[in-house]
Every structure is written in structure tokens, then in C-alpha cells.
Image (spheres, rainbow, N blue to C red):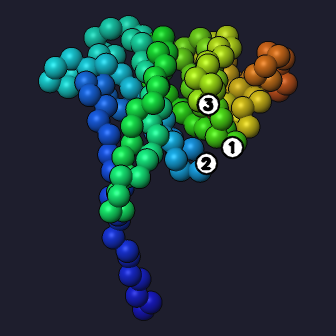
Amino acid sequence: DEQVSAKPWKHFGGASAGALAVDSLAFSPDGKKVVSTHYPQYPGHVRVSPLLADPPGQVRLWERSAVGNGYDRWSENASLTIDKMLGHAPLFFSPDGKHVHVMNDSQVVRWNVDELKPERFDFKNSRAVSPDGRYVAIKDGDDHVSVFELNSGKRLAEIDADGEWMWPIGF
């Protein structure tokens, strides 16, 4: 019969994505940056992806700054267009907070958010990048996954689920 008291959430500020649907969000390790993935929308909030095959998406970088009275403002600092971005694309910061990884149908994109420079690695059907950014898992059919070293493209492992479907995949 232990009682639990919850503290109310504190509002730290907000940001608007405009006419773009927000799919994924990730905080930097220090909590000072947020990245988000977006798809364009038509007026009336109809998502474009069912209407267009493989629409481009955007990754947006937001940075926090204090505005006083305990509130913060999140301002968009930069954006990056990703061709044929997967819906609900996995998105995360590297442990050092310097890179963001996101995938599309044929590439893994590692975006250096300090220098605002993207690196693109050709991997068809990529589904997960390791937290340290060194490895990528590729879906090879419904019951098979291959793991590659991201920088070299060297295949390191193959995982077979013996006819069982694998989805989602994560490190």
C-alpha cells in the first residue's frame, strides 16, 4: 500500500514543424539539441507518403536556449533533406553528441551536427545502426539479417531466423 506521488511535468518551451508531419525525435546526450524527422503534408494534414512513392523527408536540428523565467526556446538551427526516407525513420545521436544517424531505402546518413556535413553510405534495406555508429544491420528477406561495418562495408555477421519474420531490428 505504498503511495506514489508524481511531480508535474514542467513545460520547457516548444517549436513548430510548420507543414511537416513529425515522425521521429531524438535528444542529444547533453539534452541541448533535438533532431526530428519530417514528411511534407498537403493542407489539411494529409500525409504525402500514401500519395507519392518514396517522398523525400527532412531531418531538422533544434537547439535549446534559455529565455528566462525557467523557460527555454527551441530554435531550428539546420535541416537536411533525405531522399526516399523510410516512414518513422529511426533517428539517434551518437554517444558523443556529434553525429545523427538516419536511414532511407538505399543509404545510411551520418550527419555531423557540429559541422553540418552529411556522410552517405550505400546500404539497401538498412534497418538499424549501432549506437556507436560503427555497424549497420541490413534486412535480407523476411528471416535474414546481415551486419556490416559502416565505414568499410565489410560483412561481419549473418543472422538467420529459420523462417521466422524479423521486424523490427535493433542493436
Q: Residue furthest bottom?
A: 1
**For this rendering, which residue is in front, 141 or 14?**
14
Point 41% across, 52% down: residue: 66
Marks 1 and 2: CB-CB under 8 Å? yes
**For this rendering, which residue is in front, 38 or 75?**
75
Quadrant housing residue 46? top left
Kind of residue at badge 2? Pro
Circle 1 packing at 10 Å, graded few (<14), some (14-19), many (20+), is some
Query: Relative to 58, is 123 on the left or the right?
Result: right
Place of residue 156 in the rendered image (x, y in percent of width and height, measured from the top left): 85, 24
- Where 56 sits versus 114, above or below? above
User: What residue is shown with label 3?
Assistant: 114
Q: Quadrant of the N terminus?
A: bottom left
Describe the element under mark 2 as helix, strand or loop: loop
In this view of the protein, can residue 161 be seen by the observer? no
Q: Which mark is residue 95?
A: 1
Circle 3 packing at 10 Å, graded few (<14), some (14-19), many (20+), is few
Circle 2 packing at 10 Å, graded few (<14), some (14-19), many (20+), is some
Q: Residue furthest left?
A: 44
Q: Which mark is residue 153?
A: none
Place of residue 47 in the rendered image (x, y in percent of width and height, measured from the top left): 27, 21
Q: Which mark is residue 29?
A: 2
Describe the element under mark 3 as helix, strand or loop: loop
- C-alpha span from label 2 to label 3: 14 Å
Describe the element under mark 1 as helix, strand or loop: loop
Marks 3 and 1: CB-CB under 8 Å? no
